[in-house]
Image (cartoon, rainbow, N blue to C red):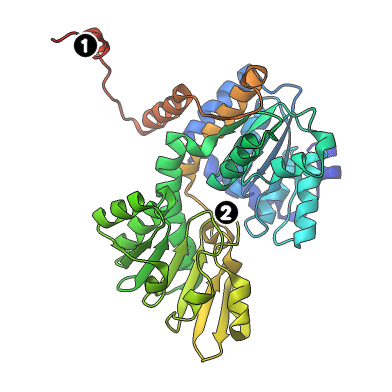
Amino acid sequence: MSASAKQNSIIADPSLAKDGHLKIDWVRAHMPVLNRIRDRFEKEQPFKGLKVAISLHLEAKTAYLAKVVQAGGADVTITGSNPLSTQDDVCAALVEDGITVFAKYNPSPEEYKQLLIHTLETKPDLIIDDGGDLVTILHSERQDLLAQVRGGAEETTTGILRLKAMEKEGQLKFPMVAVNDAFCKYLFDNRYGTGQSVWDGINRTTNLVVAGKTVVVVGYGWCGKGVAMRAKGLGANVIVTEIDAIKAVEAYMDGFAVMPMVEAAKVGDYFVTVTGNRDVIRGEHYDVMKDGAILSNAGHFDVEVNKPELEARSVSKRTVRRNIEEYELKDGRKVYVLAEGRLVNLAAGDGHPAEIMDMTFALQAMSLKYVNDRYKEIGSKVVNVPYELDEQVARFKLESLGIGIDALTDEQKAYLDSWVEH
C-alpha cells in the first residue's frame, strides 16, 4: 500500500477493502479490451511521472480504469461524480492499491464539493471528468491550479455541453476530448448500457412489474432510445416525449407513441428522464399525474425532475423503501421519486454492465494518452476522439468475442476511391 495514498485519502471505512477488491476482480475478468490496454500501458508507461485526477461514478468498473491509468505510470487521485453512486468498499480497495481517494457515499453538498477540490489540489497534469465538475472548478474558483493541466477527457453529454459553452466564450484553457461523442460510447454505452442499467436500478428498487404498465421516456437521444427499447422488451407500453421533431419522428417510426409531456403525464406509470436539461417534469405535470406514478432520472444532474415544485404541492414526504421517496399531494394522490431524482442506474444500482464500460473506459484511457501526446498542438478546445482510436476499440472488442470481419481487397479500395465510371 502507498503510504501517501493511505495518509492523504478521505474515505468512509478502510475496513471495507476486501469486499471492494472482490468487486474489482469481478469486473476485471469481464473487461478484456481494458485488460489489453493495460498490458500496453505497463510496457509503454505513457503517464510516467504525471499526476492524473479522475472524477467519475466511483464503483468497481471506474476503479479498474483508475488502476489501468496507474499501470501506465501515473500517480492517480480519484473522486466521485455523484454523491449517491460512490461505493465505499471500492474506495477502500483503491487506497490499498496506492491510489489516493477523496470520496464517500452520500456526503453533504458542501462536503462533496470539498472532495472535488481536494482532488484538484493534488495539481494534476491530466484529468478525466464526468459532467464537467473538475473543469468548472478549475476555471472558476481554483484558477491557481490551471497552469499545470495539459488536458483531459470528458465522459458525458452534460459535460460536453458545458465544455463547448466554455470554448464558445473563449474561457476553456486546455484541450478536452469529447469521449461521449465517440461511436463506441454513444452507440453502445448510451444505448445498451443506459437501457439495461436504468431498468436494473428501477426494478431492484421498486420490485414491481413493468409488463402492461405505461412508461414515459422523456428525451429520445441515444440514452432514451435504449431506455425505450428495454421498456418495450419488458412488456411496457412506451410513450416518448420530445422537443426535437426529427427525434420525435424517429420514435414514432420505432413504434412508440409520441405526445407532449402534459398529455403523457396523465397516463404514465413510470417516468424516466434522459434529456440533460432541467425541469422536464414539473408542476403542471404533477397536477395531472395518476396516483402511484413513479419518477426517475437518468440524466447527469438531479434537476430534470423538479423536486421543489413537487414538494410545494405535497402535504407529506416519507421514505417508504430504500431509494424511494413518497410525496402525498394535497388531493391524496401519491407520487414516488427514485434515488432523490439522481441517476437511477447508479444511485440505485451498479451502473452499466462491465462489458459495456469496457469499451467506454478503453476510450477514456486511450483518449487520455492521445491528449497527453498532442496537447500543445490541439490547443484549448474540445476535440472528438480520433476515428482510428474508436475503430481500434471496436476491433479489440470483436477479437475478445472471437468475431472476425472482412477487409476490402485492393480492387475494392481502388473502386471506392475512383470517380471514373466502371
- For label 1, the SS is helix
The amino acid type, in three-letter code, at marker 1 is Tyr
> In the shown orientation, is residue 229 left or right of residue 117?
left
Which of the two labelled residues, at mark 2 and mark 1, occupies the earlier sequence position? 2
- Tell me if mark 2 has few (under 14), some (14-19) or many (20+) residues whose alpha carbon lies within 10 angstroms of its own: many
Q: Whole-Å distance between the Cαs marked 2 and 1?
A: 46 Å
Above or below, comparing residue 27 to residue 416 in the picture: below
Mark 1 = which residue?
Answer: 415
Quarter of the rendering containing residue 407: top left
Residue 257 can be seen in this image = yes
Q: How far across and how far down the image is residue 252, in percent?
A: 27, 57
Above or below, comparing residue 407 to residue 14 in the picture: above
Quarter of the rendering containing residue 106: bottom right
For the image, the number of numbered tags is: 2
- Tell me if mark 1 has few (under 14), some (14-19) or many (20+) residues whose alpha carbon lies within 10 angstroms of its own: few
- Quadrant of image for the C terminus: top left
User: From this viewpoint, which residue is outermost toward the left?
Assistant: 422
Mark 2 = which residue?
Answer: 300
- For label 2, the SS is loop
Q: How far across and how far down the image is residue 253, in percent?
A: 24, 54
For the residue pair 195 and 166, the one nearer the viewer reads as 166
Q: How far across and how far down the image is residue 334, in percent?
A: 51, 84
- Quadrant of image for the N terminus: top right
The amino acid type, in three-letter code, at marker 2 is His
Instruction: In the rendered structure, find residue 11 and report the number of the disc placed on it.
Output: none
> In the shown orientation, is residue 5 left or right of residue 183?
right
> In the shown orientation, is residue 151 left or right of residue 353?
right
User: From this viewpoint, which residue is outermost toward the bottom?
Assistant: 331
